[in-house]
Amino acid sequence: MESKRITLFAGHYGSGKTNIAVNYALRLKEEYDKVVIADLDIVNPYFRSKDSEKQLEARGIHLISSEYANTNVDVPAMPSEAYSIIDDRTIKAVIDVGGDDRGALAMGRYAPAILGENDYEMLLVINKYRPLTRDCASTLAVMNEIEIACGMKFTGIINNSNLGDETTADDVISSAAYADEISEVTGLPVRMTTVKEDLYDKLKEKVVNCTPIKLYVKQSWAKQEEDLWQK
């Protein structure tokens, strides 16, 4: 996937966007000197880029996040440092947008400048095995909420359909029709289908744009299910 100066990852809670954002930032660092990742997931997050801060710093990737990250305080505020993503065009920036429309609201303040520069990719991370995005219609509803909240349109899709450590090759293959349906309805291309590294060899010839990823941040799926149904 061709890298734009700014790449945004957004999707519903538990879609896996944060882990993908971390993986993508680490890959960018293999080619580019200045890579920054900004964690805008500031409303009741399941995963935090902050959880991977040590791995990112060890590779020379700067992390921008709310001072309230990894605390029990949900304050929709970002440090002024986040504007460096807009001001410094010598960096490659990765943005982890908050889950659903409430989390995407924080993105709205940066949208005009990003749209003005027009060197970005905004990717919808989908997972058919999550309870609130199991079909095309429900996933499109989430997509529309995010676009309205942040004032930006998606440019592509990442199929990250998985069942955590229990994911099999068949699970990934069977999610292709779901991703293709969303792609057909929206007109957005499926930029990649992400898979755990241990499944990559089995799937690389069977899945278009198959991309291996490492699991850097994780949380109990049982906890996620409980919290999602309370929303």
Image (cartoon, rainbow, N blue to C red):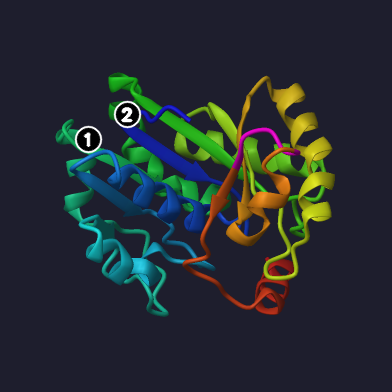
| Mark 1 or mark 2: whose residue is earlier in sequence | 1
Residue 69 found in image quarter: bottom left
Residue 164 got which mark? Answer: none
Q: Position of residue 86 (x, y in %)?
A: 22, 35
Residue 86, label in figure: 1
- Which residue is more in the foreground, 193 or 45? 193
Q: Is residue 97 above or below residue 3?
A: below
Residue drawn at x 35%, y 52% is 26
Image location of residue 157, percent across then percent down: 61, 35
Q: Which residue is mark 2?
A: 114
Region rendered in magenta:
206-210
Cβ–Cβ under 8 Å for marks 1 and 2: yes
Q: Main secondary structure of the magenta part?
A: loop
Position in image of residue 124 (x %, y %):
58, 39
Q: At x 68% / y 56%, what residue is drawn? A: 199
**Looking at the picture, which amino acid does disc 2 mark?**
Ile
Choose between 151 and 50: the one closer to the eye. Answer: 50
**What is the CA distance from the residue labelled 1 to the residue labelled 2?**
7 Å
> The C terminus is located in which quarter?
bottom right
**Is 4 covered by the magenta stretch?**
no
| Residue at image location 68% in from the left, 33% down from the top | 208
